[in-house]
Image: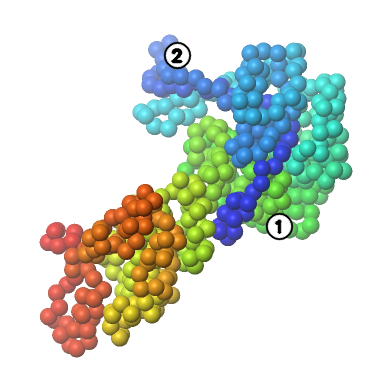
Amino acid sequence: MSHHLTDVWQRLSHPNLLVVGDLILDRYVWGDAERISQEAPVILLREQGQETRLGGAANVAHMLRGLEATVTLAGLVGNDADAATIRDDLQSLGVDTSTVMTDPSRPSTVKIRFMGRAQHRHPHQMLRVDREVRDAMSPEIARQMLAVLLPRLSEFDAILISDYAKGVCTAELLGPLIAAARTAGLPVVADPASGGDYNLYAHVTGVTPNRLETFKATGQEIRTIDDALVAGRILVERFQLDMAFVTLDRDGIVLVSADGTEAHLPTRIREVCDVTGAGDMVLATIGVGMAAGIIPVDLCRLANVAGGLEVEQVGVVPITRQQILGDLLHGLRSSGDKVCTLEQLQVRLANRKRTGQTVVLTNGCFDLLHAGHVSYLQEAAREGDCLVVAVNSDDSVRRLEKGVDRPLFGEDYRAQMLAALEAVDYVLIFEEDTPLAVVEALQPDVLVKGGTYREEDIVGRDVVLSYGGRVKAMGAVPGMSTTEIVKRLRLFDTGHANTIPVLRTGTERAAA
């Protein structure tokens, strides 16, 4: 399935999206939380620096730019220095801010986070101070915004609503906008405000509430996946939605659609540094994918990856297309889909190289997998990010004069054994006597060979060096070879087992 997702993600276009919602400026104060104040029992933060980042709907716009979408942002700011910072940051990203309105009667929304680090560990949020007005924006401003947006709807491929309950997402604005989008066949996805009125989002294509938000909207507690499915059905039916994406943090996403489609898409466990911005990243990914026509189940899978990458960051950090592609490719290591044809491998390696990964290629018969092979392949994998093992076919092994009784194991069995190793990313079976054609087709960044080969004797060396690649002879583990092991097994078979010395790795011999 990951290969399918990589193909889908690679074919993704660059949609034009409208984001409507609350603009927020996140200001971070970083420092060392090094001691307790003598004046009061509070932690002292020794400031080391400050920075500002876009938040709320502005952050969704930032995330979308990281995903290479064209973005227009509609929202509200005050007439203050923070508004100028928000506009400047958005414009520097290439976001169209022509529909960002100014209301001098209210401040721009700012969240100030104090981030403390203790003993050089990950920084953690110590305190947040908010400067905001939550009153609904005036109907007059809503009419001004609609007057600009409605004539432009044909420009957009989808609309995203990012509601942080700061006053922009009112019935006066969203009602006419959603109705017009519905008439135009334009998908609308809303990330609801926590505890907000879901009637504001009635008739949208989809909503992306988290576990708590879903409970507040439906009254259905979510302890299990079945609970989430029930809550999703309530959302879809009560608010006449096409679908609901209920996000369940470590448990992934539950999808419920009006057409009866229901699914739970789990996510893999990650190291969580900061959950801030994860919901925005999920909304952005679903929006880009929906605008491109990706089916809802795949939208959930992609959103799981994007949200997972976001929680591994400290603070709000946009995730790029390349990072998502790299994570999808990384997931293939445990997918059981490592054995490829040459044509499949060319496509997959092109994807990896596009993300900056270094491809390592080695080859051999690997007739009887032993400790020497495992040690060598682990060492080879450390030369780059992706290890490809090219395996001689059965006919090729016989032509190499390994003996009439070789290979001991068929090519499919040998390929599967190699694919089971953590160090190996892909396995390819080749028919030729040498891997030269494979090297020419795949153009690895690093070509390695184990055993007694010298670098100048490695087949494909000249090809790899011609385009600036590296070639390395890895050496052999003494006493560890398939031929030697086969000889010992034959001695066992003839009744001479007591005369056979125990095979030991180099480490074991040194220890002895």
The reply to whether residue 369 is visible in this rendering is yes
Quadrant placement of the N terminus: bottom right
Residue 262's disc is 1
**Residue beneath the point at 20% across and 79% down:** 488
Label 1 Cα crowd, 10 Å radius (few <14 / some 14-19 / many 20+): some
Residue 91, given in percent of the width and then of the height, sits at: 64, 25
Furthest-bottom residue in this view: 494
Tag 2: Cα neighbours inside 10 Å, few (<14), some, or many (≥20)? few
Residue at image coords 37%, 77%: 396
The reply to whether residue 22 is in sight is: no
Residue sitting farthest toward the top: 39
Residue at x 49%, y 59% (from the top left corner): 346
**Observer-nearest residue: 479 or 251?**
479
Q: Where 56 falls versus 39 (above or below)? A: below
Residue 104 appears left or right of 342: right
- Measured as percent of width and height from the top left, residue 112 is found at 57, 21
Mark 2 or mark 1, earlier in chain:
2
Q: Which residue is mark 2?
A: 40
Is the residue 317 above or below the residue 8 in the image?
above
Estimate the spatial distance between the alpha carbons at disc 2 and disc 1, rounded to whole Å. Answer: 54 Å
* Callout 2 secondary element: loop
Instruction: Mark 2 vs mark 1: give the one in front.
Output: 1
